[in-house]
Image (cartoon, grey):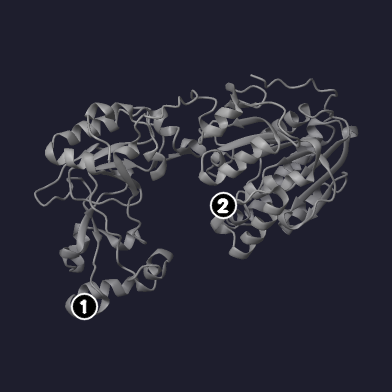
Amino acid sequence: MGMGTQNRRFSPVRTLSDSYENRRLALQTELDAKKTIDERRKLGQFATPTTLAREIVSFGIDNMDTPHGIRFFDPACGTGAFYSALLSEADANDIAVATAVEIDPLFANAAKSLWQEFDISIINADFTDIEPVDNYNLVICNPPYVRHHLIDADNKNRIKYKTEITSGVKLSGLAGLYCHFLLQSVQWMGEGAVAGWLIPSEFMDVNYGKAIKDYLLSEVDLFRIHRSNPGEVQFNDALVSSAIVWFRKRKPTAQSVTFTYGGTLKSPKEGKDISFAMLRKETKWTRFPCLPNRVDKEHTPKLKDYFDVKRGIATGGNDFFIMEESQIVDLGLPFEFFRPVLPSARYVQISEIESDELGNPILPQRLFLLDCRLGEKEVREKYPRLWDYLESGRDSVGSGYLCKSRKCWYFQEQREAPMFICTYMGRQSAENGSAFRFILNNSRATVTNSYLALYPRKSLLESLAQKPDLKKTVWELLNTMTPDSLHSEGRVYGGGLQKIEPKELLNVSVPFFEELDILQS
């Protein structure tokens, strides 16, 4: 599989390293306790577990041209998990230089104090705002996992500009901070230097990740991507599926990359060499190495040939806008401004939803969405109880981002009740092996954004109108989609949580739909 490692040319000297690692772990726990989880998310502070840090550093050393004269660099060191691992895995005499950067003064000062007896320079600064000071031959990093919406606009523009001028890559505004760290780090590396990045695996599947993947295939020597089993959560405080990306700073020397999965870097459960040609064609790299290479069938029908797919309604405040029938009665609100809505997916265990004579779904929990399209003046004059209820939520729900962006803050998106529904996220079921379910909706209920709504396109819609019984055939065909076909288009997070977006669902191949003998529109 092309993943053998070199024999270590020295024996690790662990003098004091275990003792210091125990002190570091205690310090990490103490510092984490001083911040809320939201404060840590804003800076992307999720510490690397000891075993994983040592595994990564050991693998990096094994893949250096020479382990002597290690010039180590960590752009986001925290308390120094990777430096601690370096002391454990390398001979102290072979560490020529060690430098680390940490943006948070609380962590930077703690790390300086902890490692003051060792020869490491810890810089308290924003990595994206400083110039390289040396050339390093071993870069190891677990960069801050900060989502794009948590970066203020001015800072995001500055970081994007810095990434573009240093790497030549113009990243999408949707890219997380870790993407910029990876691309900007290359300027700190000497020719032939090895880099190992512990990052979310989502970059391998999402649109903004294409620019990163193109860079990895053309500008550096990408030689290994190891993806952890999503069911084996690496970080207790972050729901994220991880990948370890390895490359050398030089032009590609081969035309394939080794993808491994599960187990450890040195003993993965699965592995396969994937050609550059295949990687350039494939949009979902997380299918490797477990799923077979996609066969390029130009004329294989996809779901988009038969359906439009939309996310369910985002209400702007489910607790305010969605009510049980008894609540509506108790408040004396007019039922004419409510439409049935399905409960969230975890409360809908059946696969076919029947309706009563009014078109309401027959379910244990009957919910209704407040969907009034009248202007405020008319509501105030004609429906005083409804007006009082809306007024009770104006300053809270009405001031939220989504409600504020509407023409009238309580107007809901207009969406027909979908006949076919797919759950938006879930974990693999022991029952059918799939994380997603297709539900046949015979009611007039709409759905919230915990579902995807499938609307038949023209030809299929006409066929369904002519042959009402066809809807069950279509529904059964949807449920014959293999878990692999769905999961390979979606994305996976830590703990095995899987999600599929509308565009991803549309791209699922459905060769079995050809038996419907429906002209594609």
Residue 49 seen in render: no
Q: Residue at x 67, y 57 (%)?
A: 161
Vertical placement of residue 39 versus 388, above or below: above
Drawn side of residue 375 relative to residue 57, left or right: left
Depth check, front residue: 178 or 265: 178
In the picture, the quarter occupied by the N terminus is: top right
Q: Which amino acid type corresponds to the residue marked 2 in the rendered image? A: Ser
Where is residue 137 drawn, in percent x and y?
Answer: 81, 37
- For the point 29% across and 41% down, the residue is 307
Q: Earlier in the sequence, mark 2 or mark 1?
A: 2
Query: Residue 453 at x, y = what percent?
Result: 30, 46
Q: Is residue 314 left or right of residue 262?
A: left
- Image location of residue 190, percent across then percent down: 82, 40
Quarter of the rendering occupied by the C terminus: top left
Pair 2/1: label in front: 2
The residue to which callout 2 is attached is 172
